[in-house]
């Protein structure tokens, strides 16, 4: 009897100890700008992308370490002329429904029909969509469009049955509102995380999808709390007190500098996604003369601009640019010379320009809410003054900027823009900046309207062979540098303050970094430390 | 009957003001530079998409037609869809207004229950140490804007001393009460969830205090100044001659006449609270209507601007009406004036 009692006690104690040492639920806390858009057809900002990459899966994923793509929901694909055939893996949505070819077609048609978010990547491209069988989907394009495969990385696949079960009346015929109202607060995805609650201006709570088809590492956070719209002072207090694990990239350099010196915190970075460009309006004097443009590009003080981004002696939130494409993009040349100030060359180019600097007053614009652009504007003013150009630095609210950008005659001489890759294809960056079809939009304020550049960009879209495309985009890059519609300010390096409580391999190891906006915030790949 | 007439007149005046505000805001929202359809759809949308959205928003119609359609929708509770967060504006207001109202109500309560007693104490012991301390506090309270107080309070009491939470409305570990009013404290109370109530009170304490400090200072100064004036009047001297106690004199004979301008100021303070709420909401991570309104303006969200401004204007008018009613009860001359007016 005594032995039995002892055994029972030992068993009870062992159970107690096991329970006591059981792994506690891990919570990752991070923050972004508001509102967080949960509907995949409305994704456009970084915060929306974070939600989409975790809650939904696409057929393919931006590749790690290089500008390529990896399989995700599609285990394989073939490209035959204009026909793309994807074979799906056996995956399930959070609802338990299997992911089928019909879901893929529904998701693409929904995105293209709604006309919001990244719909422009798919608009007017597909002539025919077919569900060959439950796990094979085929798209036939109207004409060759090489970026189609890379663009599929931005098409989150929705659970058709769940969406249709929750549709409301709307303007999309049999599809009602396409489930828009429901999808603003709920998910219909198959991703590594499911939505527990979502308030677009306050907080999203995501929980681990333990039956995720690619498996779910134990060390990945069990719960993710993504807060929106916090003030910089609040973020600073929260992360210092351990109530936030990763702060977004949008804090001022001085705040990042102060935080990075605190114990238990570090800076992690994301680069190769985009650049800071200064577009020159090539339809306005004196910028309609290529020599003037080159003179001003040589005169710009690139080092001074980068000094504004310096966090400490080792970390700068930018690096010198080599041209229109960021490092690592298809067509980019890692050995191309960086853009540097050279006043001798600036004066030599100015001597060939048909305009006298003193006769030309330049308008340097900056977007009202991006305070650092005012400082870049002042650097421009000082740099250009060295050539004798008078200038005004003008603050423009974004709505007014977009309105003025619509016409060449109202577009300022200089517009400052940040452009980030939304897909792993170079087309996503430079087509929207330089092709004549998009002139007058916020990115294309150089009004280049160059038939040769247009022809090369079109050729890049129409050529399927990757090797041939690399050559074409290299030619585009050289041609654009030659006509100099842009001052290539710097390559953007996004810096995040993170606590030591979390490992973020994608932001710590260049071989694991994905060169697409928000794709490095796949929480499944993060590791929480107990 | 006279009180009802008084109320009816105030209500009619408020509705007239609200109608004026609606016309003004509706027109102003449409003359801010920038195409709202282009901003809403982003730089990559095609011209056809932008034009389609412009048609959806009736922006291709003359302004009076647009306004009449807006009024028709508003009367049916439809303020359109926000171009900023793509949700119906009425839904956003339903979600965010209670957050701001709760904050403002607690701040107004703090303003009244701290401001008036401070003024009374300062007036009662005027030119003494308490009066001097109160005056110094009033000066500081009135001089620094709410967001400065918000950051100082957060750094002092939340970050350093860790007595209060830094941000949010409820702790992660506390389950929110079922939504009835959208005001967490009130909903916790209705649900009998004392833990949630205490937690929500801890969360709202600093933002409400930051918001109310300027008001507390002004109310204290106003109450003190008025009471000091009343203390010098003949009827107070007469009360003293009749040997009434100082407490009775202060509360019955000095405070009551001094309270009328204080109440009026309190009404104006509500407007100030609404105006300052944005920055305090931003610092403490409160997802209220003030934050939404500012984002709507920055993003040229036509429906969001009009909806949030109208709601804030209505809240302001309601607060002023409440103050008018309170003043009418405190001062019979106003009621009599209404009867004869």
Image (cartoon, coloured by chain):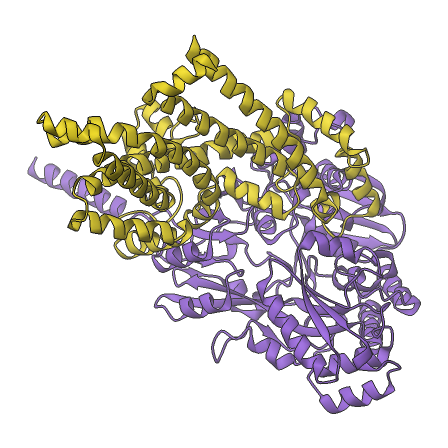
Chain colours: A purple, B yellow
Rendered position, B88 above or below A375? above
Rendered position, A492 above or below B1? below
Count up the numbered dots. 0
Q: Residue at x 47, y 51 (%)?
A: A230
Answer whether residue A158 is visible to the viewer in this image.
yes
Q: Residue at x 44, y 29 (%)?
A: B319
Q: Residue at x 43, y 36 (%)?
A: B268
In the picture, measured across the screen, residue A149 lies left or right of residue B174, that is: right
In the picture, measured across the screen, residue B42 lies left or right of residue B77, that is: right
Q: Looking at the rendering, in which quadrant would you find the N terminus of chain A?
A: top left
Q: Position of residue B334 (x, y in %)?
A: 39, 20
Answer whether residue B176 is visible to the viewer in this image.
no
Q: Nearer the viewer, residue A207 or A405?
A: A405
The image quarter containing residue A363 is bottom right
Rendered position, B76 above or below A391? above
Q: Looking at the rendering, in which quadrant would you find the C terminus of chain A?
A: bottom left
Q: Nearer the viewer, residue A333 or A489?
A: A489
Q: Nearer the viewer, residue A318 or A101?
A: A318
Q: Position of residue A386 (x, y in %)?
A: 70, 85
């Amino acid at each position: 009897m005594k032995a039995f009692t002892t055994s029972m006690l030992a068993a009870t104690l062992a159970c107690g100890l096991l329970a006591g040492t059981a792994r506690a639920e891990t919570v990752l806390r991070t923050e972004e700008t508001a509102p967080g858009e949960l509907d995949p057809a409305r994704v456009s900002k970084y915060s929306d992308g974070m939600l989409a990459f975790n809650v939904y899966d696409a057929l393919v994923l931006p590749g790690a370490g290089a500008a390529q793509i990896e399989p995700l929901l599609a285990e394989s694909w073939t490209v035959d002329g204009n026909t793309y055939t994807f074979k799906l893996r056996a995956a399930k949505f959070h609802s338990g429904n299997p992911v089928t070819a019909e879901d893929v077609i529904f998701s693409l048609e929904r995105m293209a029909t709604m006309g919001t978010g990244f719909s422009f990547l798919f608009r007017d491209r597909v002539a025919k969509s077919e569900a060959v069988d439950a796990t094979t989907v085929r798209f036939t394009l109207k004409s060759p469009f090489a970026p189609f495969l890379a663009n599929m990385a931005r098409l989150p696949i929705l659970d058709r049955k769940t969406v249709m079960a929750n549709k409301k009346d709307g303007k999309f015929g049999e599809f009602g509102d396409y489930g828009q109202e429901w999808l603003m607060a709920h998910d219909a995805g198959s991703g590594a995380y499911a939505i527990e609650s979502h308030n677009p201006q306050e907080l999203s709570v995501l929980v681990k999808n333990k039956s995720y088809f690619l498996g779910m590492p134990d060390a990945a956070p069990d719960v993710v709390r993504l807060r929106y719209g916090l003030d910089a002072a609040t973020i600073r207090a929260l992360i210092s007190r351990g109530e936030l694990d990763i702060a977004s990239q949008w804090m001022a350099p001085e705040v990042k500098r102060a935080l990075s010196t605190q114990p238990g915190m570090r800076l992690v970075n994301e680069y190769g996604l985009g650049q800071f460009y200064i577009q020159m309006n090539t339809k306005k004097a004196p910028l309609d003369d290529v020599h003037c443009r080159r003179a001003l590009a040589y005169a710009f003080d690139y080092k001074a601009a980068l000094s504004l981004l310096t966090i400490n002696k080792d970390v700068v939130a930018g690096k010198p640019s080599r041209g229109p494409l960021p490092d690592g993009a298809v067509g980019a040349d890692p050995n191309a010379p960086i853009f540097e100030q050279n006043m001798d060359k600036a004066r030599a180019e100015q001597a060939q320009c048909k305009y006298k600097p003193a006769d030309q007053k330049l308008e340097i614009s900056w977007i009202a809410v991006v305070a650092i652009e005012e400082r870049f504007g002042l650097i421009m003013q000082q740099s250009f003054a060295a050539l004798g150009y008078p200038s005004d630095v003008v603050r423009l609210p974004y709505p007014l900027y977009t309105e003025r950008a619509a016409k060449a005659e109202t577009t300022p001489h200089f517009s400052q823009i940040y452009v980030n890759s939304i897909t792993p294809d170079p087309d996503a960056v430079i087509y929207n900046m330089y092709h004549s079809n998009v002139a007058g939009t916020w990115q294309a304020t150089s009004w280049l309207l160059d038939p040769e550049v247009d022809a090369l960009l079109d050729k890049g879209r129409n050529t399927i062979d990757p090797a041939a495309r690399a050559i074409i985009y290299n030619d585009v890059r050289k041609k654009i540098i030659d006509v100099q519609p842009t001052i290539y300010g710097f390559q953007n390096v996004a810096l995040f303050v993170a606590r030591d409580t979390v490992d973020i391999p994608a932001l710590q190891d260049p071989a694991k970094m994905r060169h697409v906006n928000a794709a490095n915030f796949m929480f499944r790949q993060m590791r929480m430390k107990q | 009957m006279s009180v009802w007439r008084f109320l009816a007149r105030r209500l009619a005046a408020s509705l007239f003001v609200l109608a004026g505000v609606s016309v003004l805001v509706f027109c102003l929202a449409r003359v801010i530079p920038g195409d709202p359809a282009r901003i809403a759809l982003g730089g990559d949308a095609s011209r056809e998409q932008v034009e389609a959205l412009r048609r959806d928003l009736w922006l291709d119609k003359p302004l009076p037609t647009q306004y009449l359609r807006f009024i028709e929708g508003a009367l049916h509770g439809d303020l359109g869809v926000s171009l900023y967060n793509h949700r119906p504006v009425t839904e956003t207001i339903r979600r965010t207004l209670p957050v701001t109202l709760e904050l403002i109500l607690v701040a107004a309560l703090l303003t009244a229950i701290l401001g008036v007693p401070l003024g009374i104490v300062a007036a009662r012991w005027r030119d003494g140490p308490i009066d001097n301390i109160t005056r110094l506090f009033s000066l500081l309270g009135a001089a620094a804007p709410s967001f400065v107080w918000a950051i100082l309070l957060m750094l002092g009491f939340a970050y350093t001393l860790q007595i209060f939470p830094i941000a949010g409305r409820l702790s992660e570990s506390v389950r929110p009460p079922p939504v009835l009013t959208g005001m967490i404290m009130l909903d916790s109370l209705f649900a009998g969830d004392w833990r949630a109530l205490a937690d929500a009170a801890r969360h709202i304490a600093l933002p409400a205090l930051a918001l109310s400090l300027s008001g507390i200072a002004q109310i204290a100064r106003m109450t003190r100044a008025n009471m000091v004036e009343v203390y010098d009047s003949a009827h107070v001297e007469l009360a003293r001659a009749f040997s009434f106690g100082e407490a009775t004199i202060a509360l019955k004979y000095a405070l009551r006449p001094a309270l009328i301008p204080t109440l009026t100021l309190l009404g104006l303070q509500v407007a100030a609270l609404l105006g300052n709420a944005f920055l305090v909401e931003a610092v403490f991570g409160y997802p209220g209507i003030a934050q939404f309104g500012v984002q709507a303006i920055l993003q040229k969200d036509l429906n969001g601007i009009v909806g949030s401004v109208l709601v804030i204007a209505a809240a302001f008018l309601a607060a002023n009406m409440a103050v008018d009613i309170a003043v009418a009860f405190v001062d019979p001359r106003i009621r009599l004036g209404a009867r004869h007016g």
